[in-house]
């Protein structure tokens, strides 16, 4: 057996001995992004999508997820790769329950040019430092918040 065959045999042996564990896959995409594309400037929509994807990636990574791919308006994340945990399925679900990226994207869509929209808790914290005005209750699709 030559050196290359020995390396291949070692790799095959290691693979056969490796512990198998299930892989949980989370795919999250920005709801109604197609409708948003009709109403918004392409550059603004691209910024919303980038912010959404970065927020999703942070949520996944917080629970040990691995960002496998950015796909259009979505993110595909693996839980259980490259490192497996006994609760990878739970970690994937917990990452999916964080509505912060979706809320941020929806709120950004409410903003007019050269304006910033913040949620009520941020408003309460920052109103002493910044000049702000309340927009009043807003319908944010997919969220219980107003």
Image: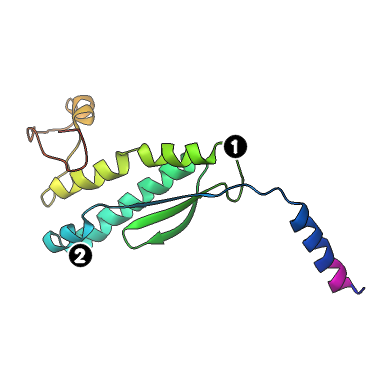
Name the residue at 42% across, 36% down: 94
For the residue labelled by badge 1, is the local secondary structure a helix, a strand or a loop? Answer: loop
Mark 1 = which residue? 86
Does residue 66 show up magenta in the picture?
Answer: no
Q: Position of residue 91 (x, y in %)?
A: 48, 38
Q: For the view shown, which residue lies furthest in the right direction?
A: 1
Q: Which mark is residue 119?
A: none
Mark 2 = which residue? 42
Name the residue at 17% across, 32% down: 130
Name the residue at 10% across, 37% down: 138
Instruction: Measure the C-alpha gap from mark 2 to mark 1.
Output: 42 Å
Q: Position of residue 133 (x, y in %)?
A: 8, 33
* Classed neighbour count for the residue bearing mark 1: other residues with Cα under 10 Å, few (<14), some (14–19), many (≥20): few
Number of labelled discs? 2
* Classed neighbour count for the residue bearing mark 2: other residues with Cα under 10 Å, few (<14), some (14–19), many (≥20): few
Tell us which disc is closer to us: 2 or 1.
Answer: 1
Asked if 8 appears above or below 15 in the picture, the reply is: below
Q: Is residue 125 left or right of residue 96?
A: left
- Res 104 quadrant in image: top left
Q: Quadrant of the C terminus?
A: top left
Q: Position of residue 119 (x, y in %)?
A: 20, 34
Looking at the rendering, the stretch of residues picked out in magenta corresponds to 3-7
For the residue labelled by badge 2, is the local secondary structure a helix, a strand or a loop? Answer: helix
Q: Quadrant of the N terminus?
A: bottom right
Name the residue at 31% across, 51% down: 51
Q: Nearer the viewer, residue 23 or 104?
A: 23
Marked residue nearer the N-terminal end (2 or 1): 2
Q: Contact (CB < 8 A) between labels 2 and 1? A: no
Q: Position of residue 35 (x, y in %)?
A: 16, 59
Q: Is residue 6 left or right of residue 65?
A: right
- Res 6 quadrant in image: bottom right
């Amino acid at each position: 057996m030559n050196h290359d065959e020995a390396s291949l045999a070692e790799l095959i042996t290691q693979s056969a001995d490796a512990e198998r564990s299930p892989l949980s896959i989370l795919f999250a995409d920005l709801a109604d992004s197609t409708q948003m594309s009709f109403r918004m400037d392409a550059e603004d929509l691209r910024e919303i999508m980038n912010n959404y994807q970065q927020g999703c990636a942070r949520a996944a990574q917080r629970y040990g997820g691995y960002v496998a791919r950015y796909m259009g308006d979505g993110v595909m994340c693996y839980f259980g790769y490259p490192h497996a945990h006994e609760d990878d399925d739970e970690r994937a679900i917990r990452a999916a329950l964080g509505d912060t990226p979706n809320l941020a994207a929806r709120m950004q869509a409410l903003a007019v040019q050269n304006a910033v929209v913040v949620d009520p808790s941020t408003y309460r914290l920052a109103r002493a430092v910044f000049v702000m005005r309340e927009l009043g209750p807003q319908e944010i699709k997919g969220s219980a918040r107003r």
